[in-house]
Amino acid sequence: MEEGTLKEPSHCAGTYGTEGDPDPFQWDTREDCEVRQILDRVADKWSLLVIALLDRRVLRFTELKREIDGVSQRMLTVTLRQLERDGLVKRTVHPVVPPRVDYELTPLGGTLHTTIRSLVTWTERHQNEIAAAREEYDAKEAAAVS
């Protein structure tokens, strides 16, 4: 098991609204918070790329590795195992020689892909504004150092 990962989901304190109902827009910032653990997993850059690539198609490990620039074999293996454990990716081993392993999104993973697509659309729409903000920030920092 990965260091810092709990076997059992923990319930987070302080995540309730004024009427005692869970507030879906607030979560505990403690490391053992279940919501934080899930967000850490699905918001990881490798996980996002794997989920995006598996949208409505089945890919082999080597195809995923070839498509994801910069991911190591070990990191891709860890990412796929974590996504499989979370029920987002299905791994199918075919009994052939040499062994063939396919990966695809589960129905749950497919629902997450819809959310990721919204995030990518937002990023594409605002990338120029973000680039301008970065340039302005970097210029201020450079001026302050001078």
Image (cartoon, rainbow, N blue to C red):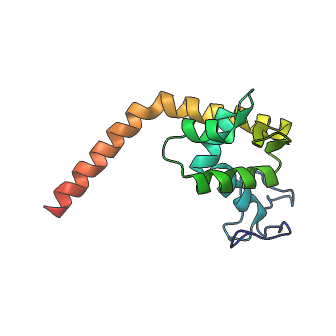
Vertical comparison of 96 with 16: above or below: above
Q: Residue at x 77, y 36 (%)?
A: 104
Q: In which quadrant is the C terminus drawn? A: bottom left
Q: Residue furthest front?
A: 97
User: Could you say where residue 32 lies in the image, as x and y percent from the top left?
Assistant: 73, 71
The residue sitting at 76% across, 40% down in the picture is 100
Residue 60, position as x, y percentages in the image = 70, 37
5 versus 50 height, above or below: below
Q: Is residue 142 left or right of residue 117?
A: left
Q: Residue 99: which quarter of the image?
A: top right
Viewer-side residue, 71 vs 121: 71
- In which quadrant will I find the N terminus? bottom right
Query: Is residue 107 or residue 97 the one in the foreground?
Result: 97
- Of residues 101 and 112, the one nearer the viewer is 101
| Of residues 71 and 51, the one drawn nearer to the viewer in this rendering | 71
Point out residue 110 in the picture as x, y percentages from the top left corner. 78, 34
Give the image quarter of residue 62.
Answer: top right
